[in-house]
Image: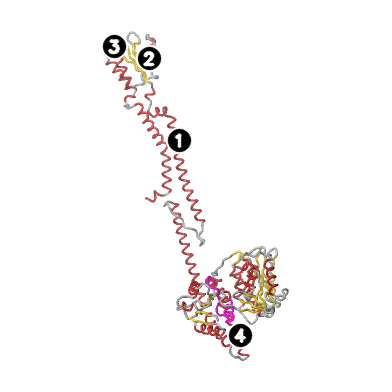
Amino acid sequence: MARILYIEDESDIGSWLKNDLTERGYEVIWLESGEGMENYLSDADIAILDVMLPGLDGFSLGKRIKKAKNDMPVLMLSARTAVEDKLEGLSFADDYLTKPFQPDELAARIEVLLRRFQKKDQVLEFHHLQVHTKDLRIIDREADGEIQLTGKQYQLFQYFIRHLNQILTKEQLYEGVWGEQYIEGDKTLMVHIRYLREKLEKNPSRPEIIETIRGIGYRVKI
Amino acid sequence: MKRFFQSLQAKYMVLILVALFLFQAAYLLVAMLAMGFEEDISGEKSKNDSDPNQIEEKWHADAEELESASKETIRNHFSEWKKKYPNASMFWVDGKGTLMEQLDVKGNLPANWTPAFTAKFIKERYGGDPFTVISFIGGDEKNGFIVLEIPRDLFLPPMVQVTEKYGILLGAGLFLIISLFIIVSFLFFRGIRKRLLHLQEAMERRDIDNLPIKIDVQKIDEIGQLEQKFNEMILELKESKQREQEEEQLRRELIANLSHDLRTPLTKINAQTYSIAKENLSPEGKQAIKALETSIVNIDRLIENLMSYTLLMASKHRQELIELDVVRFVRESMASWYPAFEKEGFEVIIELEPFEEKWQADPMWMGRIFDNILQNVLRHAKDGLYLEVATESTDEYDAIVFIDHGKGLKNRSVEKGAGIGLSIVDMMVRGMKLEWGIESGEEGTMIKILRIH
């Protein structure tokens, strides 16, 4: 069970979100200011910070957390929506969600961050596949065997898992996995997607796991 | 006064005065130098010694004083004069016309002087060169006469003597001094020119804030004052820019805070609505919750748009134009918008072909434009359940086209608030020197964002 350190001074919002997240199965430590935050840092898996707080603001708290514990994901949750604020927040934080927000969206983002920081070993189910997120073990339930991926295929699939449910353009995928500027017309990515599908999909010509979004890119969705 | 002497005007005047007096002064200087030489060579010489009348009188007086016309006395007399006038020559002819004694005489003198020759000699020498004085010894013609010859140039004024003797030296000296003057004036003007060019260069240099950089003032002359004034102007510019930035910052802060303060209660309403929605509700209750949720989203959107609109109207929206691969940008925007349309059951067609040229655009602004257009489609064109995003390239323009099959702008769905969204699109598109067009009818709406070649 993931532990969330949540700092919010508005008690209405704070108590409501604490309840909601607790119902979703998280353990929530809710503080009304950054005072005493340090005591909970070692226990928490992720921090959710409001920006406008009494005393130190959320940006300063976030930076302190990142300094003390670099591998802890930080999500800024603020009613400040100006681009300047978002940019300042994202200069150190891992995500920035503006208020008002849908708790479903917040929960989804928390999951993405926990996965990204591999805070928990999740077992994801994709049709006939079972994927262990921490070490990216892929089990074919039907054939009851592990699927081995080569280096680039592994990296590509890992990139999809880290950006689960997100549509990725071919530029993003190529630059994310190969680390080089994508050149229009390059077929490398398509070739690797085809290999990956041949290994993962039941019927590679009608892919179910790696979805093609025409005109945009690809998506792996739960 | 000190300032005056530091000025270029004063320096220029000094230069001109020096030029005016230089030639005379140079002549004098060179002459004096040369005279110094001369005196070194010939030793002290009183003024009287070089006056022909004085010499003549003295020669006469000395001759008169000679008592006897013995060889001894004459020789002594000659050698005394020789000491005084080294260039002089002398001879003695006795009463019988015989040449008795001579000293340093150039040319041959006859041994016997006939009265005719004597007369011819006197006639020749009268007023001629050398200067010649003839005296009878002891004032008596029986003793014969003694003759003194001195070259005439001994009596010329010192300047002429010097010119004749040291002409080349004098010319070279003058040439040297005039050259020196020309060099000094050249350096003077070159110095001014160099500093002016330096100033011009400095005025063209720009700091990171796009303002000129201060100049290091080294001299307090006219150019130095100009540089000082220039520095003062930069300072004023900097201050005014800073003031403007502070105001901008204040305005931005104010709007951001206002928006934050509006959103906080909205978040609370959202939270309460969410809690109620989890209760067992009647169909009417569920309907009400749905309406509430929609309103919350709309208010959120409106606050956001109002904020942008206010900033745009005051031209305070930050803009940073970069070379943007706009097709890639559209694709990435669509990647984030796709799920929302998918959820509503839209048919989404995306046909993007790369443009040949990149656009000069601010990605934040571009994102905002797309968001506003797509938000409108999602909210107002739900009936059509169709969205097409495509590129269009002709000889005149590159364009991004958004097509929906809603009921058009005139038959706006119950949800209002699209106007401000499109106003922002309009201001931002024009703010980036792009163009846009909208065609709307019963069958749907088409919006094009164009970049004219």
Residue B276 visible in the snapshot? yes
Rounded to the nearest angstrom, the CA distance separating label 4 from label 1 is: 104 Å
Q: Which residue is mark 1?
A: B175
The image shows residue A1 at horizontal and vertical percentages of 55, 81
Q: Which residue is mark 2?
A: B122
Rounded to the nearest angstrom, the CA distance separating label 2 from label 1 is: 46 Å
The image shows residue B333 at horizontal and vertical percentages of 63, 72
Query: Mark 2 and mark 1, same subunit?
Result: yes
Q: Which residue is mark 4?
A: B291
Residue A39 in magenta stretch: no
On screen, residue B334 above or below B265: above
Q: Secondary structure at mark 4?
A: helix
Question: Which of B189/B56 is in front?
Answer: B189
How packed is label 1: few (under 14 Cα within 10 Å), some, or many (20 or more)?
A: few
Q: Which residues are magenta?
A: A90-112
- Sequence-wise, which precedes: disc 2 or disc 1? 2
- Sequence-wise, which precedes: disc 4 or disc 1? 1
Nearer the camera: disc 4 or disc 2:
4
Q: Is residue B242 left or right of residue B37?
A: right
Rounded to the nearest angstrom, the CA distance separating label 1 from label 3 is: 58 Å
Rounded to the nearest angstrom, the CA distance separating label 4 from label 2 is: 149 Å
Nearer the camera: disc 4 or disc 1:
4
Q: Amino acid at mark 3?
A: Ser
Chain hosting mark 2? B
